[in-house]
Amino acid sequence: MNIIVAFAKSQDAQNFKSILSRGGYDNVLSFTSGVQALSAMQDLGSGVIICGYRLSDMLYSELLEDLPGYFQMLLISSSANAPASPTSEKLMYLSTPLKKDDLFSTLNIMMEGVTRSRKKAKEKRLHRSEADKKTIESAKTLLMERHHMTEPEAHKYLQKCAMDSGNSLLETAEMIISLNYT
């Protein structure tokens, strides 16, 4: 599972990365800016981002708004900066000072949640109706004809657009079809 650590101070990000590595978490990337973290999340596709209240270029709340579909956020901050109420199912909060056991148990719960979400989405994709399959195929055909893509390229493009927009593959296919016929 992918883990991203993002804090305004590089030393804080490195400290968290080191703690996680010693705890057995391998795929840990660290950043100081929200833009860097978002770019990495787009590339990785799923995981958990651990961040502070403020990054070098944005607040955690701004980063949360742009969080890709299969990512969850663990906010680490003082109780003074605690979210008033969790506004998103993608957000968990731990206050400082922090115990390693709390960090690791919360992180494990979040990673299980991400895995479960991906599994549910995969099962849903496997049980699409024939009409839904035709809609997706029509969108791929349009992309192939108008943008000279191969079938795998068109499918990957649909997936990426769906993930970037937070929509399902079917919704994205429907949007592509409506945009090309208007």
Image (cartoon, grey):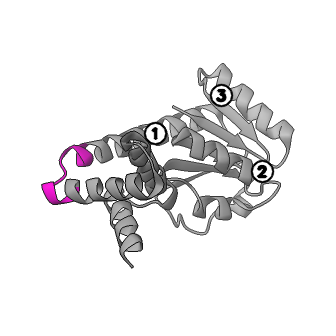
Read off the residue under disc 2.
33
User: Percent position (x, y) of residue 81?
Assistant: 72, 62
Crowding around mark 2 (Cα neighbors within 10 Å: few <14, some 14 to 19, many 20+) is many
Residue displayed at 69% across by 47% down: 37
Residue 109 bears which disc, if any? 1
Question: How far apart are the alpha carbons under marks 2 and 3?
Answer: 19 Å
Magenta stretch, main secondary structure class:
helix
* Mark closer to the observer (2, 3): 2
Q: Quadrant of residue 20?
A: top right
Q: Is residue 1 left or right of residue 179?
A: right
Question: If you read the primary sequence from the N terminus, does the residue marked by circle 2 or circle 3 appear first?
Answer: 3
Q: Is residue 147 above or below residue 2?
A: below
Q: Is residue 59 left or right of residue 68?
A: right
Q: Is residue 126 magenta?
A: yes
Question: If you read the primary sequence from the N terminus, does the residue marked by circle 1 or circle 2 appear first?
Answer: 2
Q: Amino acid at mark 1?
A: Ile
Quadrant of the snapshot with the C terminus: bottom left
Name, please, the residue furthest toward the left: 130
Region rendered in magenta: 123-132
1 and 2 marks in contact (CB < 8 Å): no
Residue displayed at 41% across by 37% down: 112
Residue 74 bears which disc, if any? none
Question: How far apart are the alpha carbons under marks 1 and 2?
Answer: 25 Å
Q: Amino acid at mark 3?
A: Leu
Residue displayed at 56% across by 38% down: 44
User: Percent position (x, y) of residue 52?
Assistant: 72, 51
Q: Secondary structure at mark 3?
A: helix
2 and 3 marks in contact (CB < 8 Å): no
